[in-house]
Image (cartoon, rainbow, N blue to C red):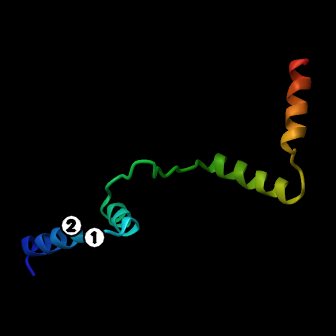
């Protein structure tokens, strides 16, 4: 099948699709950015920080919202 014929078939088929998820996936595959669907790439340092945070969470080394609010108020002298 020639390129022009293939393009026409794809355009015709895509124009009839109603499935939002399928359309978004087609956009991703062909490199069309989708609003609100940004991909973030982390540096090696950022990845290590995330892994460390996950380990801390798994070991129960975290603050609840209330505890964090209390510490912040203490730091601010409230």
Side of 54 where 61 appears, left or right: right
Q: Residues within 10 Å of mark 2 (few under 14, many from 20)?
A: few
Side of 53 where 61 appears, left or right: right
Question: In the rendered image, which quarter is residue 77 located in?
Answer: top right
Q: Residues within 10 Å of mark 1 (few under 14, many from 20)?
A: few
Where residue 72 appears, as percent x and y from the top left, is 85, 28
What's the distance in space between the residues labelled 2 and 1, CA to CA? Answer: 6 Å
Q: Residue at x 8, y 75 (%)?
A: 5
Where residue 78 appears, as percent x and y from the top left, is 90, 19
Q: Which residue is mark 2?
A: 15
Give the number of callouts. 2
Side of 7 where 48 appears, left or right: right
In this view, 68 is above or below 27: above
Q: Quadrant of the N terminus?
A: bottom left
Where residue 9 appears, as percent x and y from the top left, is 14, 75
Residue at the bottom extreme, as displayed: 1
- Foreground of the two, 9 or 46: 9
Q: Which residue is mark 1?
A: 17
Tell me whether circle 2 and circle 1 mark residues in contact (CB < 8 Å): yes
């Amino acid at each position: 099948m020639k390129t022009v014929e293939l393009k026409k078939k794809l355009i015709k088929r895509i124009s009839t699709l109603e499935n939002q998820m399928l359309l978004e996936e087609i956009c991703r595959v062909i490199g069309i950015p989708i609003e609100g669907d940004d991909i973030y790439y982390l540096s090696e340092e950022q990845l290590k920080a995330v892994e460390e945070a996950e380990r801390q969470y798994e070991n129960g080394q975290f603050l609840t919202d209330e505890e964090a609010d209390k510490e912040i108020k203490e730091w601010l002298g409230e």
